Image (cartoon, rainbow, N blue to C red):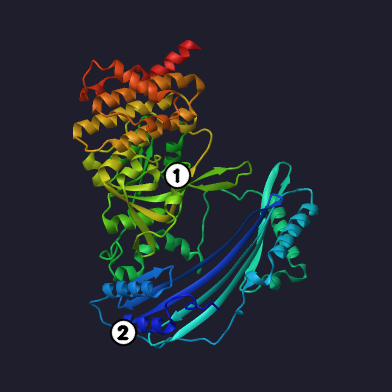
Amino acid sequence: MSNFFDKSDLSRKDADKIVSDTLQNCDDGELYLEDTKSESILLDDNKIKSSSYSSDLGFGFRAITGEVVAYSHSNEISKDSLKKSSENLKSTLKSMKGTYNHDISRSNKKFYEDINPLEQKTLNSKLEVLNKVNEYLRKKDNSVKQVTTSFAGEQKSIEIIRSGGEVLTDVRPLIRFNVSVMLEKNGRKETGVYGIGGRQSYDEYLKNDNWKTVCEEAFRIASVNLESKPAPAGEMKVVLGPGWPAILIHEAIGHGLEGDFNRKKTSAFHDLMGQKVASEGVTIVDDGSTDGSGDLVEAIYGNNSRVKLLRKRNGGCASARNFGRRHSSASHIAFVDADDRVDSSMFTSLLEVARYTGAFVVEGEFKTFVRDENGADEFELSYEAVSYQSNGRHGLSDIEYDWIPGSQIIVGQPTIWRRIHRRDFLDRKDVWFPEHVRAFDDQIFQVYVGVYAGAIAHVRGQFYHYRQHPAQDIRQGDERHFYSFNMFRTILLRSLDEGWSDVFPILQSLINTMAWSYSGLRDDLKPIYSDAAVEFLAVYEMTFGEKVPKRMLERTGIPGLSFLVPLRVQKMAAKQVSYGMMRLESWRWQPEFIRMMVKALE
């Protein structure tokens, strides 16, 4: 058990006094002290790939009066830090009075020992077990292609100090031993994973070579998967019995209808009790493509009065999105790509935050996934995950969110599909998808949204699953990349017409787009793209009277751009800086012309 006061200027007597003084007018509360030591060791690909050890120390101070909860925490246990936390709690609850509840339920049951599993087994002995597992499984069968095994251990010491000097303590050991084995047969690969663990020492689980039992079960699971057949697909009847299946309903519609949220009036439905809150109908747009999807909808739902099928001539994705929005009466609009997926509760959470805050735009997080040769999905967190590792700064029930500036999405990757937009906001600002553009039309939409929204609510832990595959438009490296020049020209012309005060985020987005497009472009198109970029950036400088920083030009990866742009501007020096420059056209910015020219040269 840790002595939290041994190496601190804070004594137990000081802590008791501060806690009692802080909580004297509260209904409940406590000081929670925690000391956690943890380790992890991973063997993969026939070698120890990683080994780590960490130690965390800190406290949380909580005070409750009525339905108001005040909380403060620190990773420094000292008299000064505890006093500051006390002042924060008092400031939050200064106008409230309560009576402290000293009666708490107690239990004399002890389910685990006060041990430290990290110290009971040496590092060398743990490494020895991991190597034995690897050797045992690889010798077991020639179909074994990969073995991954790991140890994870933790000891957590806690102490809770309540008002009046009442103290509760606990030591919580925890270990985990995992084995993963991949088998291959006739070109098919499958994995089996199994593990054991709990609040005991490593030896309690691994004595008498028990690790072999874990290996055998992981191997058995992989073998079953190797012989498995695809589950039947298609439309089928689903019967939900009592118990766990009700979670499906709860996750779909339940959060906003929970009693506490309606009683506290934090739910968007609090004033709609007894009223119908879901739409009766579904509107489906047949975009005029030749896959027969419109006929399929009509055959299945043609007699269903709640399904409205709208047909239009084929005009591309942008045209279909605009058409559907014009015929929708919804208060919020979202756009989802047909081959992607979302967390089941994502749009429910986004809508809750949108209705609670009144935000013009609310977004979730996203991760990418690819399907491997065996049909299994492999996920990867997005580039922005590193920016959202701590908890959200705002909360609504169990939903955490942050406010981010609109400029952040202007310069970021186009990800319109993980957002919901207030319809009146889009209509008022005249934000639509450009229908003359047959690729990357989502970027201009996202830039306008970022400019006009000001701030956007970013919801944590709700993910859009963005599928990656070689046939995507954005991966073809063809002349469609030249659409971006006219897209940014349209944006910059709008900025001039409306007098935007800051176009630097637009320039950043342009440079990011150039870098991304050039890196994936076909080699035969790169010289033309380089000329187009030089001409466009020179026109930008002559229009706005400011130079593009050299570091930004170099970031595009286009050879010589930092020299060629100033040279082009110098040749244009006879012309004065003029807003009208951006209204000039260039054949190098027209994908259709580029396509014809390349064909003529073949």
The amino acid pointed to by label 1 is: Ile
Provide the residue designation for mark 1.
300
Q: Position of residue 526 (x, y in %)?
A: 46, 22
Q: Identify the secondary structure beneath mark 2.
A: loop
In the depicted structure, whether residue 275 falls above or below residue 542: below
Left or right: 357 in relation to 5: left
In the depicted structure, whether residue 6 falls above or below residue 537: below
Task: Mark 1: give few (<14), some (14-19) or many (20+) Cα within 10 Å.
Answer: few
Residue found 53% across the figure and 66% down from its top:
55
The amino acid pointed to by label 2 is: Gln
Residue 288 seen by the camera: no
Q: Position of residue 116 (x, y in %)?
A: 61, 74
Q: Quadrant of residue 224?
A: bottom right
Provide the residue designation for mark 2.
24
Nearer the viewer's eye, disc 1 or disc 2?
2
**Residue 24 or 359: which is nearer the viewer?**
24
Q: Position of residue 545 (x, y in %)?
A: 24, 27
**Residue 467 or 306: which is nearer the viewer?**
467
In the depicted structure, whether residue 30 falls above or below residue 511: below
Give the position of the N terminus as an image quadrant: bottom right
Pick whichever of labels 1 and 2 is earlier in the sequence: 2
Of the numbered discs in the image, which one, if any, rests on residue 217?
none
Task: Mark 2: give few (<14), some (14-19) or many (20+) Cα within 10 Å.
Answer: some
Q: Identify the secondary structure beneath mark 1.
A: helix
Residue found 47% across the figure and 25% down from its top:
478
Residue 218 seen by the camera: yes
Q: Quadrant of residue 72?
A: bottom left
**Residue 238 or 594: which is nearer the viewer?**
594
Q: Quadrant of residue 263?
A: bottom left
In the depicted structure, whether residue 409 falls above or below residue 205: above
Q: Position of residue 86 (x, y in %)?
A: 33, 75
Residue found 46% across the figure and 39% down from its top:
296
